[in-house]
Structure formats: C-alpha cells, structure tokens
Image (tube, helix red, strand yellow):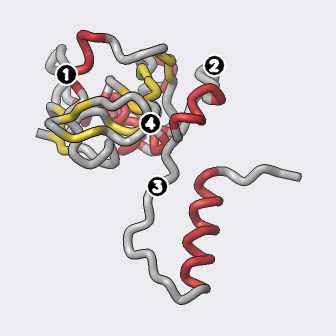
Amino acid sequence: MKIMTRTKTTLLAVLMLLGAGIVATNPAFAYFSASDFSTIDCSSLIDPDDVRFSQDSISANFSDQKPVKDLIDGLKDGSVKPSDVPAIRIVKVDPKQAVKSGGNEVAAGVYTIDNRRLYAFQQAGKNIPCTKLDSIPENQKFKFTTDNNGTSIRVR
C-alpha cells in the first residue's frame, strides 16, 4: 500500500469536505508537524512549503547586501543549484514548548531560523537543503516574531 503525501491527504480532506457540503474557504497547507520532525531526511532536499517561517518579515537583502531576488532568479534559471546554498536550519517546536512570539504562542510544528533562504526557495519552486537542530539556539529565539504561525512572511 502506498502512503499518500501530506499534500494529497490535505487535498483529499478538502474534497471530502466539499462533498459533504462544507466549503473550506482557506484550507491550511500541509506543514510538517512536530511529530514529523524525526522522519525528515536532511540528507536529501525537502519541500520548502512544508516548513514554517519563524519571523513575520525579512529584509529584501541578505546580510552581505545581495538581494534575495537574485537567489530566486538564480534558482529559477539554473545558474544557482540548491547544493550551492547553505542548508536552512530547521527546529521542532512541540506542543509543550511554548515559544513566545510578540506575546503569542507559536503553534507546534517545524520552523526555520533561516527565513530569507526559505522564502527564496519557496518563490523559486525548488526543494531546499536542510539541517536539523535539537533545539532553538538561545541567540536565535528573537527570530520567533511570526504572528500567523509561520504560514507567510512579509518582505521589507
């Protein structure tokens, strides 16, 4: 028996709701859950749409002042390979680990602390390299500013 992907499962659930006469106007993406963390294989590329943002906004430029758009364009036209880009660091936030975000608790799930790279790969439609962290580094907790549980990010 073949296991369905989260995307197919989400689509199936939406179709079942529609068949039952219930209309889901804004179905959630199938993000990795906290329990999925142990099964994520960072030896291969992962779907960037499965990972949540930790911040509510990002700069349009990397710390070296290169535009994020240049990375998006390079990934799209093939001049930049995913393996040329440092892996995003991902971390599990489980239901018992309340990460405060601007006074709000962040939903359980898998988040990145490398939001610009995640955004670039999402926009380019390319899978992304990752590295798992055991916990959120103390010097990175300030990044958890998302006000929508990491479902989107604003470019400043």
Of mark 2 and mark 4, the one earlier in the sequence is: 2
Asked whether the beta carbons under mark 1 and mark 2 sit within 8 Å of each other, the answer is: no
Q: Secondary structure at mark 4?
A: loop
The mark that comes first in sequence, 4 or 1, is 4
- Front: mark 4 or 3: 4
Q: Position of residue 119 (x, y in %)?
A: 33, 38
Q: Position of residue 21 (x, y in %)?
A: 53, 89
Q: Is disc 4 in contact with disc 3, using a CB cutoff of under 8 Å?
A: no
* Amino acid found under the numbered disc labelled 4: Pro
How many angstroms separate mark 1 from mark 2 (CA)?
A: 28 Å
> Measuring 23% from the left and 34% from the top, which residue is drawn there?
55
Identify the residue position indicated by label 2 in the image: 43
**Is 154 on the left-hand or right-hand side of 8?**
left
Q: Residue at x 59, y 55 (%)?
A: 7
Determine whether 38 is above or below 57 in the image.
Answer: above
The mark found on residue 29 in the picture is: 3
User: Which is in the foreground here, disc 2 or disc 3?
Assistant: 3
Q: Nearer the viewer, mark 1 or mark 2?
A: 1
* Three-letter code for the amino acid on which mark 1 is drawn: Phe
- Find numbered disc 1 in the image and state the secondary structure of the residue it sits on: helix
In whole angstroms, how far apart are the C-alphas of marks 3 and 1? 25 Å
Q: CA distance from mark 2 to mark 4?
A: 26 Å
Between label 4 and label 1, give the one nearer the viewer: 4
Q: Which mark is residue 142?
A: 1
Mark 4 lies on residue: 95
Q: Residue at x 24, y 10 (%)?
A: 139
Q: Quadrant of residue 146?
A: top left
- Judged by depth in the image, the label closer to the viewer, 2 or 4, is 4
Q: Position of residue 25 (x, y in %)?
A: 39, 75
What is the three-letter code of the residue carrying label 2?
Ser
